[in-house]
């Protein structure tokens, strides 16, 4: 059995919009859009990993709010994606690591970017939550 690896991603929301980040690597994912995040490190909770990843990748302080229900298997054996809604505490997001563009999408703009397949269910749920206000 392969080891279980949790990847956490943030549905970062501000003023009714969701942050989308365009991957710059690896080659097979470059140009696709995702919710920023990454793998848990040993001893980290998912929320701690998310706070760290959003700081490393975007240079911002953010606070996880609530888990989006569900868990999505990723391409690699044992890997699963979990997603939290989150809000900015301080800083303006910049594509510092792993990304080369950012966009704040309104709920009716979610189809404007080519999301990674595994992110789509969580993006749809985040859009639903944003519409609710
Ligand atoms: O930054 P770190 O190396 O910890 O992780 P990553 O390379 O960003 O993500 C690990 C894996 O999760 C990659 O295979 C990504 O394709 C996948 N992933 C995803 O499907 N959706 C996300 N929102 C974030 C990562």
Image (tube, rainbow, N blue to C red):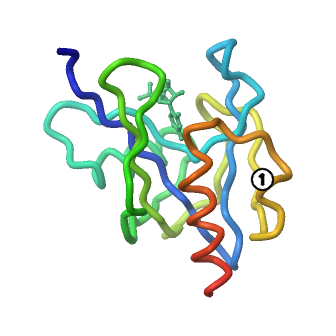
Q: Is residue 67 found left or right of 108 in the rendered image?
A: left
Among all residues in the image, which is located at the extreme left? 43
The answer to which of 110 and 24 lies nearer the viewer is: 110
> Along the line of sight, which residue is nearer the eye, 49 or 123?
123
Q: Is residue 103 left or right of residue 92?
A: right
Query: What residue sits right under mark 1 in the picture?
Result: 103
Residue 132 screen position, x and y as percent: 62, 86
- Vertical arrangement, residue 100 with respect to residue 121, above or below: above
On screen, residue 7 above or below 121:
above
**Quarter assignment of residue 3:** top left
**Quadrant the N terminus occupies:** top left
Q: Residue at x 61, y 56 (%)?
A: 123
Residue found at x 60% / y 68%: 13
Question: Can you give x and y, in whole percent of width and height, for residue 16 in the image?
Answer: 69, 77
Which element is circle 1 on?
Answer: strand
- Mark 1 neighbour class, 10 Å CA radius: few under 14, some 14 to 19, many 20 or more: some
Please report the residue visible at 63 percent of the width from the left and 37 percent of the height from the top.
117
In the foreground, 69 or 106: 69
Q: In which quarter of the view is residue 31 placed?
A: top right
């Amino acid at each position: 059995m392969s080891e279980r690896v949790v990847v956490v991603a943030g549905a970062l929301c501000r003023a009714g919009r969701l942050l989308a980040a365009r991957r710059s690597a690896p080659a097979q994912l470059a140009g696709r859009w995702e919710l920023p995040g990454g793998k848990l490190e040993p001893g980290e909770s998912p929320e701690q990993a998310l706070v760290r990843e959003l700081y490393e990748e975007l240079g911002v302080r953010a606070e996880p709010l609530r888990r989006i229900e569900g868990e999505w298997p990723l391409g690699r054996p044992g890997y699963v994606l979990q997603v939290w809604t989150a809000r900015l505490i301080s800083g303006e997001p910049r594509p510092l690591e792993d990304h080369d563009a950012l966009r704040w999408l309104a709920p009716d703009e979610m189809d404007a970017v080519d999301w990674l397949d595994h992110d789509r269910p969580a993006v749809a749920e985040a859009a639903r939550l944003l519409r609710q206000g």
